[in-house]
Amino acid sequence: MTLTERTEQPAGTRRPALRLRGIRKAYGPVVACDAVDLTVHTGEIHGLLGENGAGKSTLMKILLGLVPRDDGLILHHGRPVAIASPHEAMALGLGMVHQHFSLIGPLTVWENVILGDSGRIDRAEACAQVETIGKRYGLPVDPTTRVDRLSAGERQRVELIKCLRRDPSVLILDEPTSVLTQAESAELFTVLRRLVQTEERAVILISHKLAEITTATDRVTVLRRGRVVFEARTRQTSPQELARQMVGREVSLRAEGAALGLGALPVDGPEGTAAAEPATAPDPAVPATPTTTSEPAALRLRDVTVTVGGITVLDQLNLDVRAGEIVGLYGVEGNGQATLGDLLCGLVVPAAGTVELAGAPVDLTRPGALHRAGLGIVPEDRHRSGVVLDMSVAENLAMKSLGDVSGRMLLSRRKMHAVAQRLAAEFNIVTPSMDTPVRSLSGGNQQRVVLAREMSANPAVLVAAQPTRGLDVGAIEDMYQRLNRAAADGVAVLLISTELEEVMALASRIAVISAGRITGVLPTREATAERLGMLVGGVTG
Amino acid sequence: MNGRQAADGTGRRILARLAPGPANWRVVGVTILAVAAALGLSALLIAVTGGSPVASVQALFQGSMADPTAWSSTLLFTAPLLLVALGVCVSARSGFFNLGQEGQVLIGAMAATWVALRLAIPGPVLLVVTFLVAALAAGAWAGLSSLMYRFRGVNVVVSTMLMTFLAQQLVAYMVTTPWLLQESRIGTGTVSPQSNKVPANALLGSVGEYPNLQLNAGLLLALATAVAVAVVLTRTRWGFRLKMVGLNPVTAESAGVRVAALGGFALAVSGALAGLAGAVLLTSPVGTNRLQAGISNNIGWDGLLVALVARNRPLVAIPVAVLFGVLRSGGGFLAATGVPPFLVDVVKALLVLAFVAPPVVMNLISRRSTGRAGRIVSTPARVPEEAVA
């Protein structure tokens, strides 16, 4: 199928590029998709909205031939198709850019792009293709660069080029903006718009961010618990309406709204591009409103520098968090947040600089020193560093305070259970029993296990790194309330997040991280999209 | 930052699959079928090589369980097998896989010989010191592997296994060098590549008086150790931390566990238990009470298999070790009936496969049937991205 074969359709009477009829897929007793209908027309960007577990990814896996469907019909340009394998999907022109990039870091861009091709490799031809496609769609990238030297935005371009090279009739993007700055996101949507308008392709945009759906799509379909609950022209609906359909009830809470991307960002005032933060180098982390209290900050990072493999990931990072406040550390993913999280987990020892709790420096070479000094952390990747999936709920809750659940010699299973029962009740952990392995809990309950364990040690400082990633709305709301309550109880809370709405809704001060440095700290009420955008981009003032 | 996990990732995945799970009746059923198939196949092999399957089973039974004498011989093999298997349980829990038991058994036996022959310690104290030194020496031997890993990143599985060949050469040298441990020349007689017989006060005696049945103290030591290891692994803080390290070293480290130190220590403990097995082989009537290059007699490898079948559960290892003891003592008897001895090894291998394979195979089957989603290669952008930030 080539571009010329696809004839221009008069607007309004467009033929659907893809029709799904009554798609059903059940995993055992769990019905992931139930009688799902979806119609995607050429020349439109179709938004697919839904909470985690609503069935979006299952539907797309069916479409890509990764999962066999139990029932239902797929019509491609009016013809019923089986799509029994990924190859068949590829032959039909269904291409997808996954949320987590499937690129190989040590290979160059052109090598990644032709990966999976058969036949002879022609380097010059491949490079030329990458450049041609890049030029046509406004996706500039050097084909001879190694992928691990590219930024997240550039990697996304590579993924797009990889897909577009196969000339897809339907392009699926799964949460494409989660690693992009706002400017990069806007750029991406321009490219998508060009794709559907000038080339008669169709795009399915999967997202849980309402703002994105409303600005970038033509039609929107909302999935809830495996069913299509709403379908409309984007122009004729509103973010509030979409939120209501997605959650299944009225969304009122500010925190909940933020979770859904409803949080209204203050627009820049007349002063507009006023200097974001007076550049007081070498210490740009001095708060904009220095609340001069005599007591030391509960958590102070001082000139923390971490190098990994010769590359400076955290670069003289300075940050203060005081008791009773929530400081949001905002930035685009991949600017050192993960390493900072590992540092505060006690997994990374800085090359220089200190971490101080209540004014006393902590010896990070001693395992568990941060925990003993009163720092609790909900890590970004809970499966990696938050829980042991194959150990029970009770064991996971007790693992940082074994002394409390031991007799003179042996662990007391009775005490462990008592503690677990108490924490499960207090933190609403839904589990069949305390002996259930954490692996079989839902993401939200796993996260509650981590939070319950960390809070049970009565920490002076709580670090929450991307605490709501992968959680459904109810669990997000719960997490927000608990973070707010912790701060109200006098805990210093550091919220590391890439979700601007989350930071705006919870934090009283926002610190922006870019390339491993804090580029500025401002009170939330002074934070505007423009000022934050500049700081995120690394402009300190 | 986290090279350690990458290095042992495969082992950990195997560990997770072999981790004791809830009783699964389908697995039990398939295992029974697999064992039946293995026995059938064994019978066929014996018949094909010209033996009689019925006579073979009889011989196997005669040599291992038919009377108290046969039982005595079975249980003499059980003790060292169990001790080795317990060591495997400890190291496998921690995710630091020790495959060097055979060598550690040899080192333990060698150290025990040296103490028993060279230290003039009176009375039963000699026996105690012999066992302690055997454990310490084999533990230190295994500990070398953890040092190699810590300072040079040498894979533990590979280094522990290769150290076995070193241990074999070392023991061979010891028993062929007169001023080391070779037996003393009496008159003008020839000397064999073996040590002198250890003195009587360094021998493990029998417990209790039963007609024809010998219950060697080594078995009691092994059983007591099994209970102790079970309690330590499941009921103590140390065992809890060990389990954490084995299942998720990153979380363990962030929970304040010294992962490298704990894993290295677990490796040493595992070696020490194999060393005890070596001392039992030397001092119990299972052998000649002399150090010989072949004293370990594959007990180290078989102990690994015991733990594999018992899936690293110390108490389950007891009956499995008895089963392997049956195969050893019965196997010796079987060879006397004309069945080639290597066939006994084949039968043993088939049985191990029959016990070990079903859970893994069923795991694979259930993975296949739940869809191929797992095959998507997805590289999270954020991991390498830190490097370019």
Image (cartoon, grey):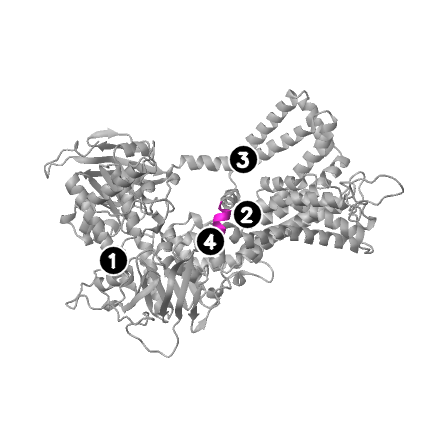
Alpha carbon distance from label 2 to label 1? 51 Å
In the rendered structure, the answer to whether residue B238 lies left or right of residue A224 reads right
Q: For residue B286, which numbered disc appears in the image? A: none
Marks 2 and 4 in Cβ contact (< 8 Å): no
Marks 4 and 1 in Cβ contact (< 8 Å): no
Residue A361 found in image quarter = bottom left
Task: State which tag comes first along the sequence, 3 or 2.
Answer: 2
- Residue that badge 4 annotates: B2
Q: Position of residue B376 (x, y in %)?
A: 37, 40
Task: Tell if the residue under mark 3 belongs to the same chain as the one under mark 2.
Answer: yes
Q: Nearer the viewer, residue B197 or B151?
A: B151
Residue B102 found in image quarter = top right
Q: Nearer the viewer, mark 1 or mark 3?
A: 3
Residue A344 found in image quarter = bottom left
- Residue that badge 3 annotates: B357
- Residue that badge 2 annotates: B155
- Give the SS element for disc 3: helix
Q: Nearer the viewer, residue A110 or A447?
A: A110
Counting other residues with Cα less than 10 Å from the Cα at mark 4, is it few (<14), some (14-19), or many (20 or more)? few
Q: Residue furthest front?
A: A124
